[in-house]
Image (tube, grey):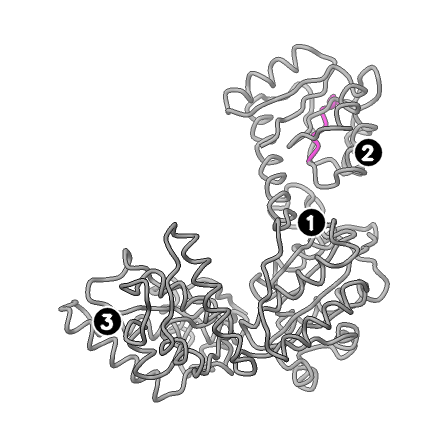
Amino acid sequence: MKPIWIVDDDESIRWVLEKALARENLATRSFSNARDANDALQHDTPQVLVSDIRMPGGSGLELLQTVKTKYPGLPVIIITAFSDLDSAVAAFQGGAFEYLAKPFDLEKAVELIRRALDESLREASVEQAPAETPEILGQAPAMQDVFRAIGRLSQSNVTVLITGESGTGKELVARALHKHSPRAAQPFIALNTAAIPKDLLESELFGHERGAFTGAQASRRGRFEQAENGTLFLDEIGDMPFDLQTRLLRVLSDGHFYRVGGHQPMKANVRVIAATHQNLEQRVREGLFREDLYHRLNVIRLRLPSLRERREDIPILTRYFLTQSAKQLGGDAKRMTDGAMQFLTGLDLPGNVRQLENLCNWITVMAPGQSVEVKDLPRDLIDGGSFAAIATPQASVMTPASMPEGAGVVTQATSAPVAEAVDPETWVDLLEAEAARMLAAGQPDVMGTLGRLFESALIKTALKHTHGRKNDAAIRLGIGRNTITRKIQELGIDGAKDE
């Protein structure tokens, strides 16, 4: 972590802040005037900048302006006198994180610097692009068409809409488009619009001003500002709330937006790439997605094939994922026998590449030997030819250390779309098999354990379908409002809200 810079011509204030921050194990660097701090900014940057307003060699407001021009995400705390209210207003207008009024309480000053530090680290984690874009593997003709499209589109600033089933690698393609574009040296910012509550999504996209809502203690840049001159990837765009679609349309139309609570229009120089697994044309017909936004996004459409359309790629993907899993665990990569590989290649994989990757992680942890045969694969996969119990999209697989004794592999699907639901006979078979394993292991309260998992899965799926509205979810499930409220509390389910 970089040091905190303190810029003040008063030696006693520098000394007090240095000692207080040292007790918090925070490194500092001090300057007696703005000119020296400006010179240091030519070859170094702080994590947080704390500066007085009035000093010889340039004012703190001038320093603030320089910092915000070069490093817009760097928090700056301005120190000012009680009577200097005009300067305080000017500091906020210039983009200051907060101001300290003299004389200040030292504990509150340290707390404020801590808040600014958290904001700085959050900005750094959001904007830090991966050192290298993960490789997109594929030799099938369908993937070669995708590679050719990436080559043609990478040098353009045109908006791209990537479609395809869950787990086909839409974000990887978006990153590749950015990596090979003239914007490659600038940020690539990804945002899953379905993973953020509606009340927070507007602020996440466009940022907010200090005091815009309860808890907004400081101004914050949104993803559009963080992606300035770079690429903004909006995943699951089909789930974006209808009122926010209007704001997004304006940005795509004229490149301007307002922060939440802001009055100054901001200009966005950002390439937008959107992705969805949903049928946007159908959502337009249902009145759930704006038709004009659909046409703005659908300038160039790039459809990613499912694994069922590129079965010849399953062997190379499997070998790659097994190698990656082995690297993470520090062992040798396991090898699939010809029979096991042929078995995998013949499967229908509704979760596509993501499910195959999850299976390879399971094999690395659970398969007994280095050479993996069909009999070493998960029993549910062998018996039913189904991936549902091993690797549903965005599933979390229970590791051996956390598995109950005698229990099979348990997964919890968090956002599998309806189109990828397991066949009824298959999931009933899986439920019976899991119950049989638990009974054979002598586990107590089998009915209660499986019943809670079943109820939790139903309620979570219904809440996702109704975007967290529990009253609508209760109606869809055919239960009462009081019942679903009680179940949500008992099962510890998050994300529910009253209408």
Q: Residue at the bottom extreme?
A: 425
1 or 2: tag closer to the N-terminus? 2
- Report the magenta stretch's main SS: strand
- Residue 448, numbered label: 3
| Left or right, residue 355 beside residue 363 | right
Q: Quadrant of residue 347?
A: bottom left
Q: Residue at the top extreme?
A: 11
Estimate the spatial distance between the alpha carbons at disc 2 and disc 3, rounded to whole Å: 62 Å
| 322 versus 380 height, above or below | above
| 437 versus 8 height, above or below | below
Compare residues 414 and 277 and report the one nearer the observer: 277
* Residue 398 x, y percent position in the rendering: 33, 62
Magenta region:
75-82
Estimate the spatial distance between the alpha carbons at disc 3 and disc 1, rounded to whole Å: 46 Å
Q: Tag 1's secondary structure?
A: loop
The quarter of the picture where the C terminus appears is bottom right
Q: Magenta stretch: residue 78 in it?
A: yes
- Residue 212, numbered label: 1
Q: Quadrant of residue 438?
A: bottom left
- Which residue corresponds to the image point at 50% horizontal and 69% vertical from the top-left? 317
3 or 1: tag closer to the N-terminus? 1
* Residue 210 x, y percent position in the rendering: 69, 43
- Residue 65, numbered label: 2
Compare residues 142 and 417 and report the one nearer the observer: 142
Estimate the spatial distance between the alpha carbons at disc 1 and disc 2, rounded to whole Å: 23 Å
| Left or right, residue 195 beside residue 232 | left
